[in-house]
Amino acid sequence: MAMDDDTLLKSSGSNNNLQGVLHMYSGNGDASYAENSDRQRHVFRILQPMFEAAMEKLRFPLEGPLRITDLGCATGTNTVADVDFVVKTLTNLCGNDHHSNGGSSTLEFQAYFSDLPSNDFNGLFNLLDRPGHFPYFVAGVPGSFYNVLFPRSTIHVCFSVMALHWLSQVPQGVVMKGSPLYNKGRVWINRGRQDVAEAYSKQSEKDLNTFFNCRAQEMAPGGVLFLCMMGRPDTWSPAQQVSVGGEFCGHDFEDAWDELVTQGIIGRDLRDSFNLPWYFPNADELRKAVGKCGAFEIDSLQVCERVPSMGEEDFEEYIKNPKMFGCMKSNLVKSFVGSLIEAHIGKECTERFFEVFSEKATALLQCNPPSRLVTCTVASLIRK
């Protein structure tokens, strides 16, 4: 089962060509995103009042449909429920005296579901073919949210939930052998080298600037932009991304890579040429990017700490059974990074990787209690 590192390194584009390979796992299997997105749903429900408050300030269009987009929609029931929530909220607001669309008796809605081209749009659209769903027109828009996706001044409500911490690419040099920034022996930056973390910070700054400039072109004046992403407190350095116990990909994830090297399944160079394309920005970093763009008024921007990502009873049930917890964590991580790992080391090695990861997560539970609480950076912005 040992792999030819040179062959895989040449064929793998997972760190520099995310658009071509990154997607949440489709279908309804144990490791599918549909079966592992309860945490995201739980977090968004807690933060919905902030989104509602921002939508109350929306400048409704005088004519034509009200256009909504979910950026980084993935697949599964979450994105459909999120858009349903937005449409229902706006419908209720439109019924109030101080909101109108020029006297039209019926306000129409156009919802755009947008994600990378590799996303399972077919699975998503099958979910929309359901009786009694909230009435709105639907379209899929494949593409990166680091590009312009819509015509100028056409979007009225834009939101992105648990997606903007994904970088456009791993910073140059981090996975290049011989580079001063080579992140040897690691696959991410949490509690790692400060210089590597700073490279991630600069990449995030560049990406956020690009993101806001793109949205500034697309959004109509008075439009609402709501963002919720993994974040960290302002007092934490870039090398402090997640607290102990709160990592999706912590010591157990790193140890699983090491185990594959030890077993001769992959080589060290192949392990070291993979890094996760994540950076969890704090409020100051996001505020700086918004200010540099200059096209948005900040309605609300804050770091929300200790946000429950699942119910307490469900969490307690999981950690009672270490083996069940290890399996659950492995499936969860596989649902959103499995495609990148598979592109990097191949399908067979990926299956073995997540078997080992499940074992490592089970063992780590005994000495490092996990947390169901996450930290999010959340922003409500109004297009000037």
Image (cartoon, grey):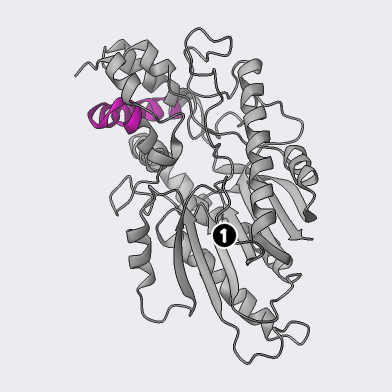
User: Which image quadrant: the N terminus?
Assistant: top left
The residue that appears at 33% across and 35% down in the rendered structure is 323
- Residue 321: quadrant of the picture: top left
The residue that appears at 63% across and 66% down in the rendered structure is 154
Left or right, residue 125 beside residue 144: left
Is residue 110 visible in the rendered image? The answer is: yes
Bounds of the magenta span? 342-365
Residue most extreme to the left: 1
Question: What crowding class fits label 1: few (fewer than 14 Cα within 10 Å), some (14-19), or many (20 or more)?
Answer: some
Residue 139 x, y percent position in the rendering = 45, 67
Residue 25 x, y percent position in the rendering = 35, 46
258, 54: nearer the viewer:
54
Left or right, residue 20 beside residue 310: left
244, 366: nearer the viewer:
244
Secondary element type, mark 1: loop
Left or right, residue 55 beside residue 114: right
| Residue 316 is one of the magenta-drawn residues | no
The prevailing secondary structure element of the residues shown in magenta is: helix
Residue most extreme to the front: 151
The residue where tag 1 is placed is: 150
Is residue 321 visible in the rendered image? The answer is: no
